[in-house]
Image: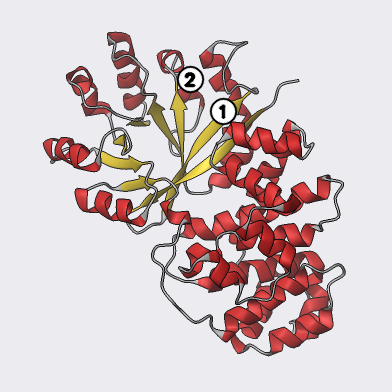
């Protein structure tokens, strides 16, 4: 049986706000389309994912989707809503008259069209009036060279996107060069390393995270920790009251905790923990930390191992603490009260938790071969891995949408 699956890579604007996601597809173990024509494979993948899980979780964001030559000639993009789709013309498409005719039709129908991994050449000049976004892979076309081409198109409506931006220095250089959008993993790496004291409120939140990882949760200890922090107390009561469903207003922490129950309490604490780490970070980081946490938890639930889902949840959530706090991860983890197995997974990438996290990160970055290798080692099947990502994506979206 064949499974297709998809990962999402955020696309950020100059202010590091997420404006959309590139949907990265994998179909079959070799990431190829051996059994069907490319346009049929693309249609099926889009139907499976863009119109189901990932379409729902795009919210008001754009979905950037690669289309091979045949799909464009057959106007496959017109099967999907133009308001939330950016049609990416794959870099291996030939700039033929036939392709130009199709691009004109898509443009006239109101679709946003992007040229993917663009290498400047005269052959593409006649396409430019129909193009909204040009994507440069800065590993293939250096920022300085891309900047010269961008200058030649000043005064046009075309916007530029820098791909494979891996560091904040590259983000800054691309921004200075005039790029409008950025794609890559610069947002999940520390912006700068600095010594910064962890505030008491954050440490309390970490202790809460440790408590919600226990089975069953010790509500008395959770109540004690919440009462230590005025802001946290206020947030909890606001969260419970705004969530609705209770005929009477919640007046005490004990009442709030009982009303919430274990699942919602875990949601609340995890969201507060990530959001309180640092305010000026890209919104992608919050969503990514929560998505990783949930997927790690779902995977551990399906493995016959001694590690608990709660531990897996924290492993995923804390995997981005270095970026959220701009400190080396080992330094951050030495300051917070979490168990050694989680620390080992995060710092040394060892143990079952380390393997699960490595697989989750490989999947999210569309490094399919690495994800498959670890998946085989953990004796997890292909369908289980794809489903946990979809379920975690929906869960994270719902959580971030909470009032």
Say which of 258 and 274 sits in front.
Answer: 274
Mark 2 residue element: helix
Residue under the point 21% across and 48% down: 178
Q: Is residue 275 above or below residue 357?
A: below
In the rendered structure, which disc, 2 or 1, sits on the residue that comes first in sequence?
Answer: 1
Q: Residue at x 59, y 58 (%)?
A: 289
- Toward which corner of the image does residue 259 lie, by quadrant? bottom right
Instruction: Report crowding for label 1: few under 14, some 14 to 19, many 20 or more residues within 10 A (C-alpha).
Output: many
Q: Quadrant of residue 97?
A: top left
Q: Quadrant of the N terminus?
A: top right
In the rendered image, residue 268, in percent from the top left (x then y), is placed at: 68, 69
**Quick one: label 2, few (<14), some, or many (20+) residues within 10 Å?**
some
Image quadrant occupied by the C terminus: bottom right
Task: Give the side of residue 150 with respect to residue 384, left or right.
Answer: left
> Would residue 303 be found to the left or right of residue 235 on screen?
right
Does residue 325 appear to the left or right of 1 in the view shown?
Answer: left
Q: Which residue is mark 2?
A: 76
Residue at position x 60%, y 31% in the image: 369
* Residue 241 visible in rendering: no
The answer to which of 282 and 214 lies nearer the viewer is 214
x, y percent for residue 41: 57, 18
3D distance between C-alphas at marks 2 and 1: 10 Å
Q: Position of residue 390 (x, y in %)?
A: 66, 42
Instruction: Name the residue at 62% across, 10% down.
Output: 35
Q: Which residue is mark 1?
A: 46
Q: Secondary structure at mark 1?
A: helix
């Amino acid at each position: 049986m064949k499974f297709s699956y998809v990962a999402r890579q955020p696309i950020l604007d100059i202010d590091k706000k997420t404006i959309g996601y590139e949907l990265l597809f994998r179909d079959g173990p070799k990431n190829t389309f051996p059994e069907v024509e490319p346009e049929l494979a693309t249609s099926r993948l889009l139907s499976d994912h863009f119109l189901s899980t990932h379409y729902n979780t795009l919210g008001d964001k754009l979905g950037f989707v690669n289309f091979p030559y045949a799909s464009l000639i057959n106007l496959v993009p017109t099967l999907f809503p133009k308001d939330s789709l950016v049609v990416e013309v794959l870099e291996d498409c030939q700039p033929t008259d036939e392709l130009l005719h199709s691009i004109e039709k898509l443009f006239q129908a109101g679709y946003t069209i992007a040229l993917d991994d663009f290498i400047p050449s005269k052959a593409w000049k006649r396409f430019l009036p129909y193009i909204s976004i040009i994507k440069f892979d800065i590993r293939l076309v250096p920022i300085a060279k891309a900047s010269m081409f961008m200058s030649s198109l000043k005064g046009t409506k075309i916007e530029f996107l820098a791909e494979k931006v891996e560091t904040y220095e590259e983000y800054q250089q691309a921004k200075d060069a005039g790029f409008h959008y950025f794609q890559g993993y610069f947002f999940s790496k520390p912006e700068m390393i600095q010594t910064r004291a962890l505030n008491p409120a954050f440490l309390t939140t970490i202790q809460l995270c440790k408590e919600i990882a226990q089975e069953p949760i010790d509500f008395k200890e959770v109540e004690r920790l919440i009462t230590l922090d005025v802001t946290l107390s206020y947030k909890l009561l606001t969260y419970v009251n705004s969530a609705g469903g209770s005929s009477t207003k919640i007046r005490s922490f004990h009442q709030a905790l009982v009303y919430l129950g274990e699942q919602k309490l875990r949601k609340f604490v995890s969201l507060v923990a990530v959001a309180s780490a640092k305010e000026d970070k890209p919104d992608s980081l919050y969503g990514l930390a929560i998505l990783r946490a949930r997927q790690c938890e779902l995977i551990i639930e399906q493995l016959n191992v001694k590690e608990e889902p709660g531990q897996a949840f924290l492993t995923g959530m804390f995997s981005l603490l270095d970026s959220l706090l701009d400190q080396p991860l080992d330094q951050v983890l030495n300051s917070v009260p979490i168990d050694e197995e989680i620390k080992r997974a995060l710092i040394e990438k060892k143990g079952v938790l380390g393997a699960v996290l490595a697989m989750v990160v490989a999947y999210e970055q569309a490094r399919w071969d690495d994800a498959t290798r670890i998946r085989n080692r953990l004796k997890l099947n292909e369908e289980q891995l794809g489903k946990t990502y979809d379920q975690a994506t929906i869960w994270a979206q719902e959580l971030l949408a909470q009032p």
